[in-house]
Image: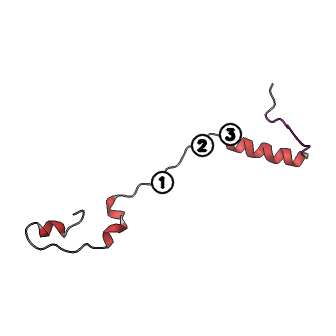
Amino acid sequence: MRPLLRVVRGEPSAEELAALTAVVAALSQRRERTRPTPLGGWASRTDAVRRPLHHGPGGWHASGRFA
């Protein structure tokens, strides 16, 4: 059977090898990636700053959200 780790240079202590083995074993476990929850349009803070209202035809439409 092939060794999991091979020391190429230096003489690590038993504690150092144990710590390295624990880190490599933890990193090798497959984990499901968690993606951040996407925020919908209603959670956007950019709409908190209101744009100037436009007068004239279509002004009511420009005053609403997502105009």
Q: Which residue is mark 3?
A: 28
Residue 21 x/y as whole percent = 79, 42
Q: Give the residue at x 54% y 46%.
A: 33
Determine the secondary structure under disc 1: loop
Question: How many discs mark residues in the rendered view?
Answer: 3
Residue 41 x/y as whole percent = 32, 60
The answer to whether residue 11 is magenta is yes
Q: Which residue is mark 1?
A: 36
User: What amino acid is at disc 3?
Assistant: Ser
In the image, which disc is placed on residue 12? Answer: none
Q: In the rendered structure, which segment of residues is drawn in magenta? A: 4-12
Specify which label sits upstream in the sequence, 2 or 1: 2
Determine the secondary structure under disc 3: helix
The alpha-carbon separation of the residues under discs 2 and 1 comes to 15 Å
Q: Which residue is mark 2?
A: 31
The answer to whether residue 36 is magenta is no
